[in-house]
């Protein structure tokens, strides 16, 4: 089971982000050719674009997933109907996206407004819903290679174009936009061809008002729920922009956050990979196996984040050819450790979504996002942009652990104990330790890493029978 989870996480969870991950290996040459202002412009634009990103699919991925499980024999017809809805919606979404860009583009990038609008909008307009249908189909059929092969090819294409535009052509922040555009166009064409000619999935452009209302009743409540991801991941940069924090400092924070984004991607990938397995456990009422999987994922995440963070200083020194950016590792530690909340959040949300208890679940996640927003508004003017790392950490703690006392969850929860308070204390303690140990002796850190890895292996071996049973 563990092999299946981690292999699927790597292939169809992380594969869509191959270009971002591979970019790590060209960090030394990228950071030598980019400024804090470049990172600031990119961070501000992408953060504002995140205001609308969750409206791109109207939350209908949940309907696609539930339709697959509840209408297994004829789900494709329903999918084609949803495909048609999204195709119409994408036209309006693209227009709204362009209007937002017009009002928020930083002064330093205003001369490139038209080309940035083109590069962002065209892939969405042409192929905005194709990737959702394609990836959901193969994820639910647990067929990761279809996604993995494409993602690897187009991901490395994106890395090459990023290198060429930034290092060779000296295009600065525009290199990112061109690389993303070209990659999205080629990958979108690939998705469309596969859907149309291989899977025979094409949009049905028929409006069935009753069915649309039924689907949106389930999907739309997930938008404010998922909107918390934006409020937690991007609102800090928007607040900085509105508070007139200079673009260079926003760029510094955005760069530090880029490392946290890698762990955010891993956490999201784990959720995608393990989701079908966990839903199957709920369906079969195998609660002990469900809990064992969740505890294993939590310990795995503690391992990778803590080990990364205690070596963060050395990693920054090795990868970054820019003294100012290399000094930002303390911020990265707090931000990376904050993403340990994810397995706990997953334990609650998987159960709620399976039972279609979506009408109120948004309250937990949206409140977490609002906490982050309000704390940033209050504290950034007093303590500076660095405090946003702490507000993100606090908000994600709320996001991850409050769900266990949420009323809708209590009605459907398992009788088994999940010990959320213990995991909460563990996350806080490990974060404090990582923050101070990053400057400690190298040999001490090596010993700690060995002990951590051995402890995780011991836990896996101790629960080997349950984990093997979970793969059946």
Image (cartoon, helix red, strand yellow):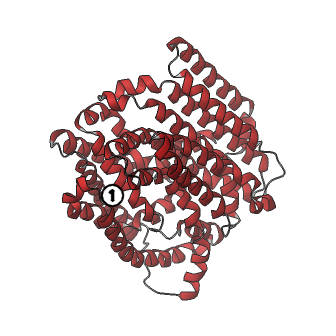
Total numbered badges shown on the rendered structure: 1
Drawn side of residue 246 relative to residue 438, left or right: left
**Residue drawn 57% across and 42% down?**
393
One can see residue 77 in this view: yes
User: For numbered disc 1, what is the local secondary structure?
Assistant: helix
Q: Position of residue 177 (x, y in %)?
A: 27, 53
Drawn side of residue 428 relative to residue 27, left or right: right
Residue 141: quarter of image: bottom right
Q: Which residue is farthest left? A: 169
- Looking at this view, is 85 or 220 the one in front? 220
**Residue drawn 38% across and 67% down?**
128
Vertical position of residue 96 compared to residue 290: above or below: below
One can see residue 468 in this view: no
Residue 195: quarter of image: bottom left
Q: Which residue is farthest front? A: 382
Drawn side of residue 220 relative to residue 111, left or right: right
Vertical position of residue 179 compared to residue 50: above or below: above
- Looking at this view, is 210 or 285 the one in front? 210
- Looking at this view, is 390 or 269 the one in front? 390
Q: Position of residue 11 (x, y in %)?
A: 47, 46
Residue 52: quarter of image: bottom left
How packed is label 1: few (under 14 Cα within 10 Å), some, or many (20 or more)?
some
Q: Position of residue 45 (x, y in %)?
A: 34, 56
Task: Identify residue for label 1.
Answer: 187
Location of the N terminus by quadrant is top right
Q: Position of residue 246 (x, y in %)?
A: 33, 46
């Amino acid at each position: 089971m563990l092999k299946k989870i981690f292999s699927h996480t790597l292939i169809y969870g992380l594969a869509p982000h191959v270009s971002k991950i591979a970019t790590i290996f060209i960090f030394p040459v990228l950071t030598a050719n980019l400024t804090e202002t470049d990172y600031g412009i990119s961070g501000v634009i992408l953060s504002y674009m995140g205001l609308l990103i969750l409206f791109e699919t109207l939350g209908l991925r949940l309907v696609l997933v539930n339709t697959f499980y509840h209408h297994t024999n004829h789900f494709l017809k329903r999918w084609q109907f949803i495909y048609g809805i999204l195709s119409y919606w994408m036209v309006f979404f693209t227009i709204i996206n362009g209007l937002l860009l017009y009002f928020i583009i930083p002064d330093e990038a205003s001369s490139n407004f038209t080309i940035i609008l083109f590069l962002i909008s065209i892939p969405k307009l042409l192929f905005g819903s194709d990737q959702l249908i394609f990836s959901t189909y193969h994820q639910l059929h647990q067929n990761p290679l279809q996604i993995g092969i494409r993602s690897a090819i187009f991901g490395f294409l994106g890395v090459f174009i990023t290198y060429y535009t930034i290092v060779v052509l000296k295009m600065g922040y525009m290199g990112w936009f061109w690389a993303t555009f070209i990659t999205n166009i080629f990958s979108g064409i690939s998705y469309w061809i596969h859907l149309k000619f291989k899977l025979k999935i094409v949009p049905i452009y028929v409006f069935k008002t009753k069915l649309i209302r039924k689907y949106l009743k389930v999907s739309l409540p997930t938008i404010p729920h998922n909107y918390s991801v934006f409020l937690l991941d991007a609102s800090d940069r928007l607040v900085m922009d509105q508070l007139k924090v200079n673009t260079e400092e926003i760029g510094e924070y955005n760069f530090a956050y880029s490392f946290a984004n890698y762990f955010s991607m891993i956490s999201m990938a784990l959720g995608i990979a393990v989701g079908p397995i966990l839903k199957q456990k709920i369906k079969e009422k195998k609660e002990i196996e469900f809990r064992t999987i969740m505890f294993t994922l939590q310990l795995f995440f503690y391992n990778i984040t803590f080990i990364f963070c205690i070596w963060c200083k050395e990693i920054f020194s090795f990868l970054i050819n820019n003294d100012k950016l290399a000094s930002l590792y303390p911020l990265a530690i707090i931000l990376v450790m904050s993403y340990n909340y994810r397995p706990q959040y997953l334990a609650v949300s998987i159960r709620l979504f399976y039972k279609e208890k979506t009408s109120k679940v948004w309250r937990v996640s949206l409140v977490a996002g609002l906490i982050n927003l309000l704390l940033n508004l209050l504290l950034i003017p007093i303590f500076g942009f660095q405090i946003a790392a702490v507000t993100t950490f606090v908000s994600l703690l709320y996001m991850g652990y409050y769900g266990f006392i949420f009323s809708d969850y209590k009605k459907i929860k398992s009788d088994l104990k999940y010990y959320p308070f213990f995991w909460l204390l563990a996350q806080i303690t490990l974060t404090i330790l990582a923050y101070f140990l990053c400057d400690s002796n190298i040999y001490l850190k090596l010993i700690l890493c060995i002990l951590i890895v051995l402890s995780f292996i011991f836990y896996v071996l101790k629960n080997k029978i349950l984990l093997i049973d979970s793969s059946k």
